[in-house]
Image (spheres, rainbow, N blue to C red):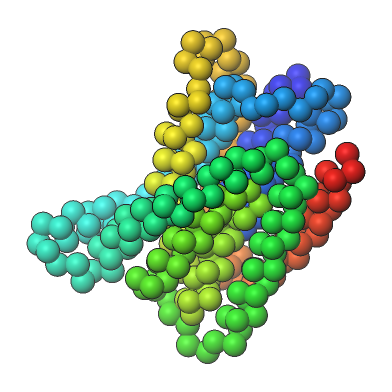
Amino acid sequence: MLGLIKVIVMGIVQGLSEFLPISSSGHLVFTSHLIQIISGNPIPEESSYDTVLSMMLHIGTLVAVFIFFWREVVEIWNALIKGIKTKDYSDYNTKLGLYIILGTIITVFVAMIFKDSAERLMESPAVVGVLLMVTGGYLWGAEKFSDSIKDKSDKVSLKTAIIMSIAQGLAALPGFSRSGWTIASGMFSKTERVACARYSFLLSIPIILGASVVYPLKEVNMTELLSYNWLYILIGTVVSAIVGYICIKYFLEFLGKYSLRVFAYYCIVAGFIASLLFTFI
């Protein structure tokens, strides 16, 4: 029963935190350690099963992005193909396609620099809590800066795309929210927050697919796959997809009316509590 509860909880956490600016990796670290502590079992090293479960939960959020943005994805793909054929890259959707390709390359380069540090931090929830507080401060600073700018762009420029891609690479560190750092970085580039959020979600597609699904496959013990409880894994995946879709829909509506400050305060408070909790446990 604990196994079912675990995958449902982690599916909800993944669906919420992948798109809300509160760090999905950080919250999965917190959740995993708390479940182990509550169950009274020692915290084991990540197993092949944990890797597969994490992959499937990310697939769930990937499905959510595709379903919500399928029209934009198709339009960007068609515009990109047309632009390559005609060598005309003036269309905004064509530019977005090129930005996403360039941004993915930049993200991978930056993320690889911090790869070893990110892996070590997965076993250090107290430090992850500190990084979550840093995320909160960055979100607050972005809103403060944005308030001082009168004329903000409603489209992502090449400069903004590059800055957001670097931020996405830095978010390889658990506690640094991918969506939070990309959106806030776009806002620091004088771009309107909803435009930043939409681009951030589109930019996440190749990264979720590559870094969270394809890359971990090398860590999977293929001979053990049949022994896993795939019913539980699929339940977690479906929960992640449903929660992720709902989260995208209402988060974009929220950003159209309100600021990121509530998430900034949440990250600071949650990070502070986590850092204290896991320091003394």
Query: Is 281 located above or below residue 40 in the figure?
Result: below
In this rendered view, identify the residue nearer to me: 215 or 14.
215
- Please give the name of the residue rendered at 53% of the width and 65% of the height, measured from the top-left corner: 183
In this rendered view, identify the residue nearer to me: 8 or 122.
122
* Numbered-mark total: 0
Left or right for 46, reference 34: left
In this rendered view, identify the residue nearer to me: 254 or 209.
209
- Please give the name of the residue rendered at 52% of the width and 38% of the height, measured from the top-left corner: 58
Query: Is 74 located above or below residue 260 in the figure?
Result: above
**The N terminus is located in which quarter?**
top right
Q: Is residue 240 visible?
A: yes
Left or right for 76, reference 51: left
Q: Is residue 17 visible?
A: no
- Residue 254 at x, y = what percent? 61, 65
Query: Is 124 located above or below residue 193 in the figure?
Result: above
Q: Farthest residue toward the right?
A: 280
Left or right for 256, reference 265: left
- Residue 93 at x, y = what percent? 28, 63
**The C terminus is located in which quarter?**
top right
Query: Is 5 located above or below residue 115 in the figure?
Result: above
- Residue 101 at x, y = what percent? 32, 55
- Please give the name of the residue rendered at 76% of the width and 62% of the height, measured from the top-left corner: 268
- Please give the name of the residue rendered at 65% of the width and 75% of the height, measured from the top-left corner: 141
- Residue 257 at x, y = what percent? 61, 72
